Amino acid sequence: LGYGVLGGVGWGLMYLTPVTSVMKWFPDRRGLATGIALSAFGAGAALAPSVIHALVDSFAVAPQYIGDCLLTSGVHGEAASASLQPLLVELTTLSDGSQVIASNSPVGEAGTPVVVATEADVAKSSGLVTTGPGVYAIGMGDTGIAKAMALLGSLYGVLGAVGSRFMQIPHPDWKPEQSTAIICKEEDDGSTIQEEESSKSVTTTGTTTVVQSNTNNNGLPASYVTTNTKQFPLLWFSVFGNATGGLALLSSSKLMLTDIFAGVAPEIVTPAFSTGYVSALGIGMALGRFGWSAISDVLGRQNTYAVFGLGIPIVGMAPYLCHSVVDVMSIGDVNGVVGGEVVWPYLVTFYGGSVLAITFYGGIFSVLPAYIADLFGQKHAGAIHGKALTAWASSAVAGPMGLAYLRSYSYDNAMQDLLHTVEAHDASALDRSFGVSISDEE
């Protein structure tokens, strides 16, 4: 909770403030300005993992090595008991599944909680200097994560403090030359009409007309916008839906690629191919943040958000492609068709569609602040932007919960289909093979 709250506060301060400031300097090119600012945000997300891993590895300290055991020594049977048994750590497994050194162990202190590291476990700790496979004491050593995060937090704090000294905002009455005002009129049917006027001042008339301009001194209060306008809730739900789909795609796309496409075409979807796919998603994110925000200056914010709606069928198409490629491959194997010839159309569609959807995910956040300033004015755009980003936070909760539910639902359905199939052919097969009855679904 503390890390989430403090991190969220810092993120909000260093995310919202520069974006709001840069829009005030370029009110006639808000999309391009926010795109440049937020492309740095995307670049930081791409560079940070390698820096974090390097810091964690440098601070990490391996736990105390106690000795080898039968599981990791590679010696078993009579050879182990006759010659090497006195040199091995004897372990006892407790009722909760944890392991401790046995009282009769010739190595180590009895009752010490331990963990057994195999060759595979040691290989995963590439940056950690270890003795090798064997028994390690729990509670010793240091993962290095706390020190790395403390150093990064201090570094980010210094960079933010120094950067804030160079951050300035223009005078409230300042505007660039050849300024234009944007008037948004809300009709009785709820639709919005935008008009441009070459004017230095704009006034509000009527009860259903909201007026904005690209000057920094005009704008509706955030409290009024969130409670008395139809545009804000619609904008909130559009961000929520796009962010939920984007997060779901980010969290599951690599798994779909490696678990499904690599399973049916391992000669194509190699580890290097999967790594390139992850890099392509990161590049798509950065290009989306910059590209769509710049395009919105020409295409219009409303039209750009309409384009983002294409992400809905793209995200919904991903599971269909995965199921289809498995079905087609099974038919191809029967008919003797080469796997790669069957997989390529589905793989290219999945690859290109997911990268395009990720550009939408990045673009919706870079276009959002400029869209808010266009709709409600620049004066309170920062506060309104912060309230709109609660949709992002909500999607971070709803997205994983939704995926977990769908995964559990699919698992239960698959298990029921399997049980029905077994029951239809041979109900006693499970009892003979696994010692459980067909009625014991658990």
Image: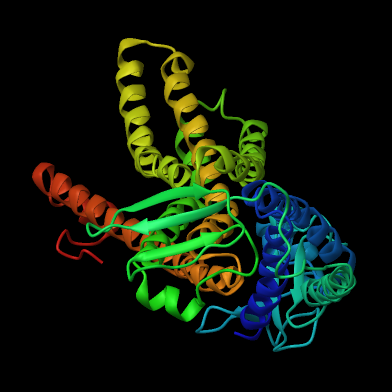
Q: Position of residue 6 (x, y in %)?
A: 68, 82
Residue at x 67%, y 32% (from the top left corner): 272
Q: Nearer the viewer, residue 351 or 126?
A: 351
Q: Position of residue 275 (x, y in %)?
A: 66, 38
Does residue 189 lie above or below 389 as drawn? above
425 vs 434, left or right, is left
Q: In which quarter of the image is the N terminus?
A: bottom right
Q: Quadrant of the C terminus?
A: bottom left
Residue at x 18%, y 61% (from the top left corner): 437
Does residue 226 lie above or below 39 as drawn? below
Numbered marks: total: 0
Q: Where is residue 181 in the image (x, y as percent from the top left)?
A: 55, 54
Is residue 140 among the parts visible in the rendering? yes
Q: Farthest residue in the left direction? A: 424
Residue at x 22%, y 53% (from the top left corner): 413
Does residue 295 lie above or below 106 as drawn? above
28 vs 324, left or right, is right
Q: Nearer the viewer, residue 218 or 251?
A: 218
What sort of colour scheme is used for the picture? rainbow
Q: Position of residue 27 (x, y in %)?
A: 66, 55
Is residue 62 among the parts visible in the rendering? no
* Displayed quadrant of residue 17: bottom right
308 vs 280, left or right, is left
* Displayed quadrant of residue 328: top left
